[in-house]
Amino acid sequence: MLRRKTLKTLTRLFTSSLAPLMPPKPRRSKAVLVKTTKPAKARTVRTPAQAAPTAKAAAKPSAGRWLVGVAVAPVGKRRYRLFLPAGRKPGQRIPVVVMLHGCDQNAARFADSTRMHLLAARAGFAVLYPEQDRLANPNGCWNWYETRTQRAFAEAALILQAVDQVCTLYGGDRTRVAIAGLSAGAGMAALVAARYPERFQAVAMHSGVPPGVADSTASALRAMAGHGAADALAATPEDMLARWPALLVIQGGRDRVVAPRNGEAAASAWAQAAQALPCTTRAVQRGKRHAMHITDYRVRQHTVASLVEIPALGHAWSGGTAAQSYGDPQGPDASRLVWAFAQRQFARRR
């Protein structure tokens, strides 16, 4: 009984320590993204352009199927959801995009917000949505900052195990894998990429903290507030060009959870390791969406990192649905930005 009370007390303390990480919860839609967990059953997925009941949309629906799996390793296990596009030929290998959710999210909600799988249905790549276990973190955050206890590295190993399963069992191409994340998921994506750089061709951090800034809950809170100093990446310029994935950073200027300066710090860490120089910042705005300022860091003609700053964006997936938490439909479509960036890296490495 004493042990149980102690565990409950520690859980309350841990939850309260992470409270500053979380913005107020917006009202969330009750719609569930995945209505079936039967792996073998195909499910039609319509793209935004097909949402309207037009004759053209009805003629060519983009289809795919959802699978539910579990990645198991000596350090534990994690569930995941996997979207596979329709039309893959026998033996064909397809690209894989790994999507890591933020705090107070799960795989299904993150998929519903980012809608990366709708893009995958048209472009023909797989989307892997790993899911954090609430027993590992009561707020559903990936423990990207727990490097002192090795918990962060254990979770990174589980995510890589999920990638391996997708490549082994479902036709994922090991030479075309990108990883992206939001907030805590962005921190974990950067950690996974830094720990296994040869396994990824692109990494995208959306509203996250660069690797090497924190090693505990307290230092994570300081880093998120913009008071951390990132360690230099353990890579030479030659390593960065030959083995390390290119980095895309997307950061909102009105982010009150992760200080905007973290975005530039992450891009600078990649650039300094590769001895890359910043190009002229260019302003881009599409229609009535938020404007963005893009700065590329290059070595010769090779882009090592790209920093996308969106002044009007808060702590939310840019272009994400408003029906889910942490999504801003007025922002430029981050999912498209991530996939376009990944495609360029895949083409460069082939």
Image: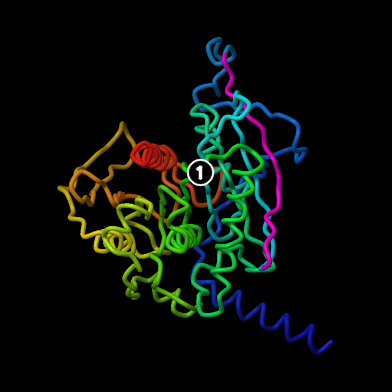
Expressed as whole percent of the image width and height from the top left, the position of residue 38 reads 77, 38
Where is mark 1, residue-wise? Answer: 97
Q: Who's the residue at 56% across and 41% down the image?
A: 127
Residue 64 among magenta residues: yes
Q: Is residue 147 left or right of residue 202?
A: right
Q: Is residue 313 above or below residue 150?
A: above
- Which segment is the magenta one? 60-74
Q: Main secondary structure of the magenta part?
A: strand
Where is the N terminus found, in terms of image quarters?
A: bottom right
Expressed as whole percent of the image width and height from the top left, the position of residue 305 reads 29, 52
Expressed as whole percent of the image width and height from the top left, the position of residue 206 reads 41, 53
Q: Say which quarter of the image contains residue 328.
A: top left
Q: How many marks?
A: 1
Where is the C terminus found, in terms of image quarters?
A: top left
Mark 1 is on which residue type? Val
Q: Who's the residue at 21% across and 56% down the image?
A: 276
Q: Who's the residue at 47% across and 57% down the image?
A: 189
Q: Residue furthest right?
A: 1
